[in-house]
Image: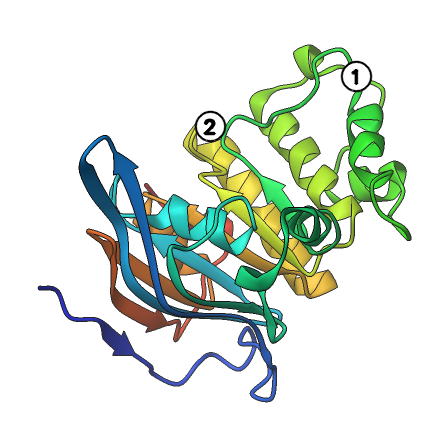
């Protein structure tokens, strides 16, 4: 059985979250089992993980390691079979389905691999659909400007490149002013140059707005831009590494 290993060198003071930043989210002894006929598939096997306010955390690992399941549980899309999941001390397991929906709308922004934009709506309209779900949302114009698309607001997804569509997806997540943005393979459908541009946008949001971001990826080099990296294998966390020197998105090679 794999043993979890934690590597905790001193962090680069220019990039690390402040030492007194609190825990935003905690997972303790989280298991997730799926039933396939008479067979139980143990996808998560006792996950212990923290997400700290104001950090970028990457979860890396091969396909089937359980990283997307972790993301879905954090985001309230799925429920743990057992264990504790707490967001700002609130027990997510104790929430009703309606309360989980409210949690997803108010607290979480999602960015997926394939954008999930409505093709018949412009970039501006795609964001308004999401921002209308919450009070005090950022305007579509402001969020699109933050991701560098001030001149593409009235374009439809078919008129945008893959990288531009992903930036619209990030702006849509950001418009709700969520405490946590969850990204599932955000560069998976992009070439390296475009992927670096998208990662640069995420870094900018973290640096300038203090947005907490969790990125799930099979692409291990992306972890170089994060404050911390969690490596998963076979449903377990096998290593947690704290960054000693974060690199810019432009410096990452894969």
| Colour scheme of the picture | rainbow
Compared to residue 29, the image places residue 72 above or below, namely: above
Of the pair 174 and 225, the residue shown nearer to us: 174
Do callouts 2 and 1 mark residues in contact (Cβ within 8 Å)?
A: no
Q: Which residue is more in the foreground, 33 or 181?
A: 33
In which quarter of the view is residue 31 placed?
bottom left
In terms of depth relative to the viewer, which is nearer, 21 or 33? 33
Quadrant where the image shows the C terminus: top left
Residue to which mark 1 is pinned: 121
Residue 103 at x, y percent in the picture: 69, 54
Q: Position of residue 224 (x, y in %)?
A: 39, 59
Q: Is residue 150 visible?
A: no
Query: Which residue in the protein does label 2 denote?
Result: 190
Q: Residue at x 41, y 71 (%)?
A: 245
Indicate the position of residue 131 as horizontal and vertical percent values: 83, 40
In this rendering, the answer to whether 219 lies above or below 83 is above
């Amino acid at each position: 059985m794999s043993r979890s290993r934690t590597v905790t060198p001193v962090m680069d003071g220019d990039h690390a979250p402040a030492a007194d930043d609190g825990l935003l989210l905690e997972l303790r002894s989280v298991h997730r089992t799926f039933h396939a006929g008479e067979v139980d598939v143990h996808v998560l096997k006792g996950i212990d993980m923290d997400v700290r306010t104001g950090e970028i955390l990457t979860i890396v690992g091969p396909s089937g390691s359980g990283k997307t399941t972790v993301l879905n549980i954090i985001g309230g899309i799925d429920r743990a079979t057992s264990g504790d999941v707490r967001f700002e001390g609130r027990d997510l397991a104790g929430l009703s389905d309606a309360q989980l929906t409210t949690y997803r709308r108010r607290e979480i922004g999602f960015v997926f691999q394939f954008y999930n934009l409505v093709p018949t709506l412009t970039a501006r309209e795609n964001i308004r659909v999401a921002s209308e779900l919450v009070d005090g949302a950022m305007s579509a114009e402001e969020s699109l400007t933050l991701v560098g698309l001030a001149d593409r607001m009235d374009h439809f997804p078919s008129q945008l490149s893959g990288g531009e569509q992903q930036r619209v997806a990030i702006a849509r997540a950001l418009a709700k002013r969520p405490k946590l943005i969850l990204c599932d393979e955000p560069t998976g459908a992009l070439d390296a140059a475009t992927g670096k541009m998208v990662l640069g946008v995420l870094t900018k949001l973290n640096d300038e707005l203090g947005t907490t971001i969790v990125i799930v990826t099979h692409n291990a080099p992306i972890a170089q831009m994060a404050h911390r990296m969690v490596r998963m294998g076979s449903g377990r966390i096998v290593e947690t590494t704290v960054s000693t020197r974060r690199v810019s998105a432009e410096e990452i090679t894969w």
